[in-house]
Amino acid sequence: MSLQAILLPLFVEVILTFVLFGWMAALRTRDMTSGGVRPDDIALREPNWSKHTLQVAYSFSNQFELPVLFYVLTILAYVTHKAGVVFVILAWIFVIFRLLHAYVHTTSNVVRFRGSLYGIAAFALILNWVIYIVVILTSPWV
């Protein structure tokens, strides 16, 4: 697989994280400048932001959970030359369902639906890790 094919899903996940960061910053700025939140209300990470600001902030924070394992796997698969078609397909499944999860998280926030999207992404990532581990452990040592 080409470098671009392997890294494009990772780039999309990174862009999602930065978009959520920017959106969260804009919402927090709005909350502060409107007077809806005072610095003392949030100084110790109290969740006193508006509901929508919290939804976006939690979605942003969520990008530092499972996606970290995705980033590590992508880099490992590329460096070890073990990123094939199956790897890229599973990477795209992971990223697409992370995008859908973030969308639901920041809009309707229907937990059951959001949880299903999270689960599908997690399953794709777990499967990708299992395949990678098996390939590495069954490859001849150099």
Image (spheres, rainbow, N blue to C red):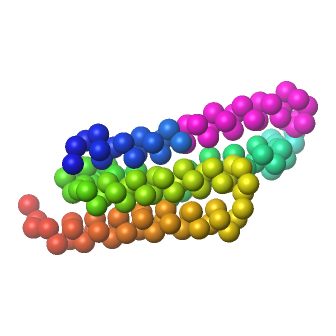
Residue at 83% over, 32% down: 32
Q: Is residue 44 left or right of residue 9?
A: right
Residue at 34% over, 57% down: 89
For the record, the magenta segment spans 17-39
Q: Position of residue 14 (x, y in %)?
A: 48, 41
User: Of 128 and 35, which appears nearest the observer?
Assistant: 128
Instruction: Tell me if residue 42 is in the magenta stretch.
Output: no
| On screen, residue 108 above or below 43 | below
Quadrant housing residue 25: top right
Q: State whether the magenta stretch is mostly helix, strand or loop.
A: helix
Kindly give the residue lying farthest to the right in the view shown. Answer: 35
| On screen, residue 98 above or below 13 | below
Instruction: Tell me if residue 29 is in the magenta stretch.
Output: yes
User: Of 42 and 67, which appears nearest the observer?
Assistant: 67
Q: Position of residue 77 (x, y in %)?
A: 27, 54
Residue at 53% over, 42% down: 16
User: Of 46 and 129, which appears nearest the observer?
Assistant: 129
Residue at 23% over, 56% down: 84
Q: Does residue 61 appear in the picture of this structure? A: no
Kindly give the residue lying farthest to the top in the view shown. Answer: 33
Quadrant housing residue 38: top right
